[in-house]
Amino acid sequence: MSDAHPDAPPVVVTDTVRNAIRIVALDARARARGVRLGQSLSDARALVPDLDCHPADDAGARALLLTIAAWCERYTPLVALDTAPGRDHGLFMDLTGCAHLLGGEAALVADLEARLCAQGFHVRLCLADTPGAAWAMARYGQGRIIPEGAHGEAVLPLSLSGLRLEPALVASLGRVGLKTIGCIAGLPRAPLAARFGVRLMQRLDQALGREAEAISPIMPVAELSTERRFAEPIARQEDISQVIAALSSGIVEPLERRGLGLRRCRIRLFRVDGHVSGLEVQTARPLRDAKMIARLFEERIAGLHDDLDAGFGFDLMRLDVVHADPFEGMQAEMMAGNSAGHGHDALVDRLGARLGLDRVQRLVLADTHIPERSFGREPVARLAAHPGARRAASGAAALALLPDLPTPDAIITRPLILFDRPELMQTIAEVPDGPPLKFRWRGVSYEVARSEGPERIACEWWRDGRGARSRDYFRVEDRQGYRFWLFRHGLYGRETSEPAWYMHGLFA
């Protein structure tokens, strides 16, 4: 709860519990004047008439906790939400291997507490060997840093509530005289588990380190990461760009050692006031070029149409490699300095940084005979999901074109302009399979001078249903020399008694 003016009234948070409005959270001033958790609001007001009451907002509290969790990633990427029963939720942080970055465990804990207090929060924290011991000591103990191996003795005098048990279970244990963790630590396990459940023994083992407990980080852990901390916050766009370039250079060597190239990475910018900004870019192929990585982030910032909101400045910037793929060398061109296809991939990456990589698309062939369905679009980056995918796709496209090339007539079987949807028209035609003699389309009448066809395309009953109709396509030319591609929808006398005619494309 944030600090308030010394003369401000005590603050409490209320919620409906068992059909009564009760206190579920309170500040130190309210506690000093006799207000307690679980007390009804009417009793609390009798003690403190000027009580400042606020209804519980679980969604708002969770959003605030997630914001604090994002800020805590400045210390470690392993930050998880506390899911213990009750409203007194907090955060878990796995600081293994991180304390030396800030001068040791004591310095890290002091820095964390000082920064959160400066933002207006009251903080209770503890650093211990196990999550269970740290949770218990932070809420019911006094120590802030438990020496290695001493967590078992430290938690024994604490209340059983420190084991993250349901309040009803704690009350049941209290009725038989078991009030502290030490009371059950040395008792036979089988009778306790039979009467109070295996959850009790699991929580005890987790707190004492007998059973390993893993935390689930809110954000996925990056494969590689590099960061810069600043003694004085930076806010100028030029300084931010220089740091991004330095971080990009620093990530190249670890990628080379692992034989990887990044596909998705993000920059995290930590402001001194606790706000965390993030920028993410993706690449069409595994990338290991520091200048190109920095340029992608410049394009991403330019795509925001505004500079980053630096506030009072950033004191930490981190580059995370979210996803990386195996990096394979590319065949270089003999007369040029760039690798083959490098210009194409660089263009895709730059467009993707500004517009989003999924919006940079290409046309692909589709397995169908229906003309308007014979092609589709897919993100270009999907071709580079695996090494050599672009070469395979290009080869497949080339092979697909070969059947259309043997004769000159095959080159003109499809119009230059193909409508997205065939357009209905009126016509006079010979039956049952004859070409059109006259037709009217878009309010203009045409008289056919020459025609070629039909080219019959069967329906796709597995997609359109058993009532689908076949198509007979004709290439026709009117007396002014305009050439059209149209079709009769439905076989006369077999599929329909009144086939419809559609205009589907125009030839040059």
Image (tube, rainbow, N blue to C red):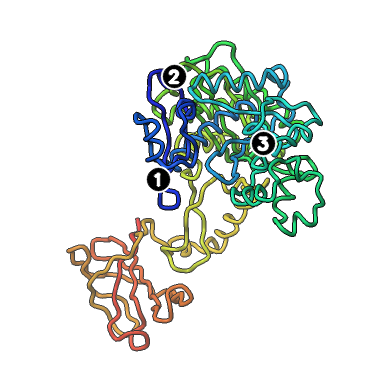
Q: Residue 424, image x and y in percent?
A: 27, 69
Nearest to viewer (mark 1 / mark 3): 1
Q: Is residue 298 visible?
A: yes
- Which of the two residues, 443 or 368, is positioned nearer the viewer here? 368
Can you say whether 342 is above or below 306 in the image? Answer: below
Disc 2 target residue: 311
Q: Nearer the viewer, residue 240 or 380?
A: 240
Residue 340 in sight from this viewpoint: no
Q: Position of residue 288 (x, y in %)?
A: 66, 31
Mark 3 or mark 2, earlier in chain: 3
Relative vertical location of residue 155 with respect to residue 312 in this rendering, above or below: below
Between 194 and 81, the one lying in front of the other is 194
- Measured as percent of width and height from the top left, residue 88 is found at 55, 38
Residue at horizontal 45%, vertical 43%? 58
Total labels: the figure holds: 3
Residue visible at 26% across and 79% down in the picture: 429
What's the CA distance linking mark 1 and mark 3? 28 Å
Q: Secondary structure at mark 3?
A: helix
Residue type, mark 3 in image: Ala
Q: Which mark is residue 391?
A: none
Q: Say which of marks 2 and 1 sits in front.
A: 1
Where residue 21 is drawn, which disc sits there? 1
Pick whichever of labels 2 and 1 is earlier in the sequence.
Answer: 1
Q: CA distance from mark 3 to mark 2?
A: 37 Å
Q: Amino acid at mark 1?
A: Ile
Q: Quadrant of residue 268?
A: top right
Q: Are marks 3 and 2 in contact (CB under 8 Å)?
A: no
Q: Secondary structure at mark 2?
A: loop
Residue at image mark 3: 136
Drawn side of residue 161 relative to residue 443, left or right: right
